[in-house]
Image (cartoon, rainbow, N blue to C red):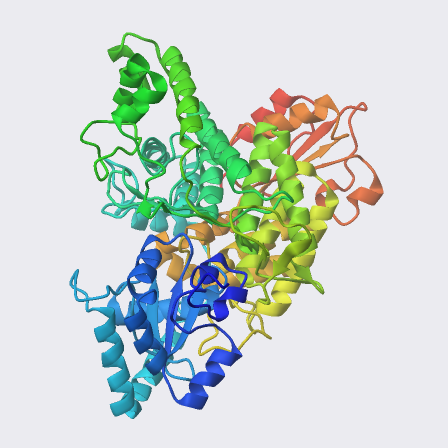
Amino acid sequence: MAEHTHTNRLAGETSPYLQQHAHNPVDWFPWGEEALDRAKEEGKPILLSVGYSACHWCHVMERESFENEQIAAIMNEDFINIKVDREERPDIDHIYMTAVQMMTGQGGWPMTMFLTPDGKPFYGGTYFPPDDRYGRPGFPRVLQSVSEAWKERRSDVEQQAGALTGEIRSRSEMGLQATPVLPDLFDRAYGSMRSGFDLRLGGFAGAPKFPQPMVLDFLLRYHKRSNRQEPLEFVRLTLDKMAFGGMYDQLGGGFHRYSTDEFWLAPHFEKMLYDNAQLAQTYLRAYQATGDAFYRRIVEETLDYVLREMTGPEGAFYSTQDADSEGEEGKFFVWTPAEIEAVLGQSDAELFCGFYDVTERGNFEGKSILNVTVAPDAYARSVGSNTEDLESRLAEMRKKLYDAREARVKPGRDEKILTAWNGMMLAAMAEAAAVFERKDYKLAAIRNAEFVHGRLMRNGRLMRTGKADGESGKGGEGENFKVAPIQAFLEDYACYADGLLRLYEATFDRQWLERAAELSQVMSELFSDEEGRFYNTAHDAETLVDRPRDLTDNATPSGNSVAVEVLLKLAILTGRDEYWESAATVLRSLASAMERHAPAFGRLLSAADLYIGPVKELAIIGPSTEPATSALLKAARSGYYPNMLVVVSVPTASVADGLPILADRPMIDGKPTAYLCEDYACKQPTTDPQELARQLADRQLAD
């Protein structure tokens, strides 16, 4: 502490983002009673600054304004200054980002919001420069104008804040008029999405481009349901362009946040756990749907990156890696031809640079982001090689360059553990473990499930986040793991329960199903309203100016969408009708909104696809260690069957109890046996994997 000129209240927080601001001259408070009471006592407006550790422009605004003694003096004199990590407090972020978007027509981080002492928003924006530039007012001028308005026209400001808060509350109830959920919803939703397709470059037209894995997952499902090839072709185009583009880390695996251009070339270089979890699942499902080995490679490279760089020693998954290193965005990831040649030698460097678009001119601030602009087979022909040999040589070169890159100064890593995001990666690891038969992925999923259950549960309830109490970047949880005093939100319960269900289907260990059911029961008790729909925050959570209800997907799926999918699966597996009816209530409430705003409801549309069905229920009776059981499982997992639930069990009444799918199903002739049912009709039981594959391929689609 002695080496710093300033130390504020953020020094004791668990969030690395808040700790990054602990030595600003700004008199920062974390969100809490102390700050809110101080604002009321002193009659000062609140300056709320919201961001996250991997956010490039958050770092810029800190350097330019929050480390500036003169600007800090204005902030300290006229405001109560509160800093919030949006990843720790999505409820606060949701409320005030809604306000920013209503006031300015856009949003983003850093978010800068001015509040009355009772927390009502009245003015805000995103990044403000230290002086007038970029068409934006300078931050000192903003501070002075807001302060003058508060002191001279306080009643007008409070009236404006009250009106804006009322609008925020009304938006939380968007579209909650119950209507039937019918199969033609999917045709209309697809038509709505199709109008935005970029049929040349993939994704949705314009820049910036975000990956939108939830929409791509729905399109894969719609291809399966409708047997139309166009949605599959669009998904493949998008996945290919993303994986060959600069948004994908061609050396280390894993996806950056999004592309700043329409070509998927220049990303914002931060890597988020949630993006990589969702995209790994989307590429995995595309692999099942197409058999394209390239998609399997992307899944494995992405998950291997997570295991290597984003996993703690006890199995927790870290949150993010920064965009910046040594004060420059993307510096860790870009190359010059000379740097490539120094590692590979001239001949290999020419081959590599030609394929990965590394030039003297560069494509990003004088250097080159690795990306692929020509198909591997075409490039192989142009250099007198075959595709297999070319790809083998390129793989060796990528390994050498990766090793060389490891000597560079790495971007910072946010090592806080977020329950929802860990649930997403748990689901991805478990799903990939099942399909690829990767024992390391299965072990990672089990260790993560045990970590969250053991470290982030308090008295039967989940907590939102925690972090090892030590220097970021050193890793480790151990005895010094510190849980933040923040109760979990809807998305935490839903995403962790979803991960547990995926783990159950990868291991068939009954404890994971039981834990998912227990969490879902608590989730329903804590977050549901009178009609059975869900709020983001628990009934006993801190009272804010609005109780947010996140209905649409953003970078992560809405908690309502994931909760619906979890409840539907539990209903099918356990036969408990109350799960089904709870999910149906949410779906009916949002049916018309899904139709009108389909791209914002990708995850809920996928849940609706499961709800409408038909659902495949596959019970395999036989010891899980038996090769014949594994052969039946392999047949089931080789194809893309998004609405199939699989259970494996030995034929004993004690295990079958409570799971209708297993009841009265013996092995035939003492051999592991598959029982496939769909749309209330069952196929002939079989012990033959090829026959099971034929049964699965039969189309029984709802009208």
Residue 199 placed where, x, y %?
A: 25, 37
Image-quadrant location for residue 230: top left
Q: Is residue 700 visible?
A: no
Is 96 left or right of 454, judged from the image as shown? left
Q: Position of residue 83 (x, y in %)?
A: 42, 68
Q: Is residue 234 left or right of residue 601?
A: left
| Picture layout, residue 436 above or below residue 161 | above
Q: How many marks?
A: 0
**Does residue 612 appear anywhere in the picture?**
yes
Image height check: is 6 above or below 444?
Answer: below
Residue at 63%, 42% (x, y): give it.
313
Q: Is residue 658 above or below residue 200?
A: below
Residue sitting at the far top: 384
Q: In front: 579, or 182?
A: 579
Q: Quadrant of residue 244?
A: top left
x then y, percent, for residue 454: 70, 53
For residue 43, which quarter of the picture?
bottom left
The residue nearer to you, when weighing 575 against 76, is 76
Q: Which x, y percent locates residue 629?
A: 71, 26
**Position of 28 relative to 265 (above/below):** below
Front residue of 46 and 454: 46
Q: Nearer the viewer, residue 68 or 114?
A: 68
